Amino acid sequence: MSNVPSDLKYTKTHEWLRTLPDGTVEVGITDHAQHALGDLVFVEVPETGRKLAAGEPFAVVESVKAASDVYSPIAGEVTAGNPGLASQPEAINSDAYGKGWLMRLRPGAGGAGGEFLTAAQYEKLIAEEGG
C-alpha cells in the first residue's frame, strides 16, 4: 500500500503539492509513482527563475525501467529545484514526501488553478488504476 499523507494535495498524474509557510509550493512525485517507476537513477529538475504553466512538463525522472516527465500542477515561477537529486536521485525512492521534493515555486496570478485531489480521493484513484 502506498503512503498517502493527508496534509498534501494530489494530481491525477501522480504529483503532490505542499504549501509552505512563505506561500511557495513544494512539488514532487507520489510514493505510488516512485514505486511504479522503480529505482531512480537520474533526475532533472528545473532551474530557478523558470516560469511554468499549469500542466507543463518541468522535470524528468529516469529509472532502470523508463524515463517519465513530471508536470507542474500550477502556474508559477520556480524558486528552487532540489539540488540534492543530481547526486542522489534515490532520495525520491526513500523519502518521496521529504528529501525527494523536485521543485518549489511561487504561484503566479491564477496559479492555484488545477483540480486537486484529497488524500482519500487519491487513494481511490490508485485503487481504480489497480495499484
Image (spheres, helix red, strand yellow):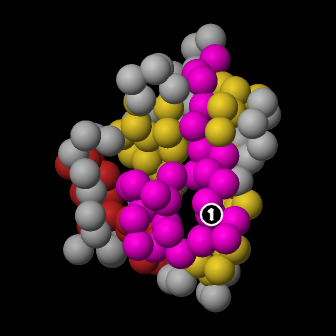
Pinpoint residue 40: horizontal percent, then vertical percent.
58, 78
Viewer-side residue, 129 vs 24: 24
Q: Is residue 79 left or right of residue 23?
A: right
The crowding category of the residue bearing disc 1, from other C-alpha atoms within 10 Å (few below 14, some 14 to 19, many at least 20), is many
Q: Residue at x 49, y 59 (%)?
A: 100
Q: Is residue 50 visible?
A: yes
Q: Is residue 10 left or right of residue 113?
A: left
Residue 46 part of the magenta segment: no
The picture quadrant where one finds residue 9 is top left
Q: Residue at x 51, y 52 (%)?
A: 101
Residue 83 part of the magenta segment: yes
Pinpoint residue 16: horizontal percent, then vertical percent.
43, 47
Q: Residue at x 51, y 26 (%)?
A: 24
Vertical side of 29 occupied by 41: above or below: below
User: Which quarter of the rendering shows the C terminus?
Assistant: bottom left
Q: Is residue 13 left or right of residue 79?
A: left
Element on which disc 1 rests: helix
Q: Residue at x 65, y 80 (%)?
A: 41
Q: Which residue is mark 1?
A: 85
User: In the image, which residues are magenta?
Assistant: 81-108
Residue sitting farthest toward the top: 109
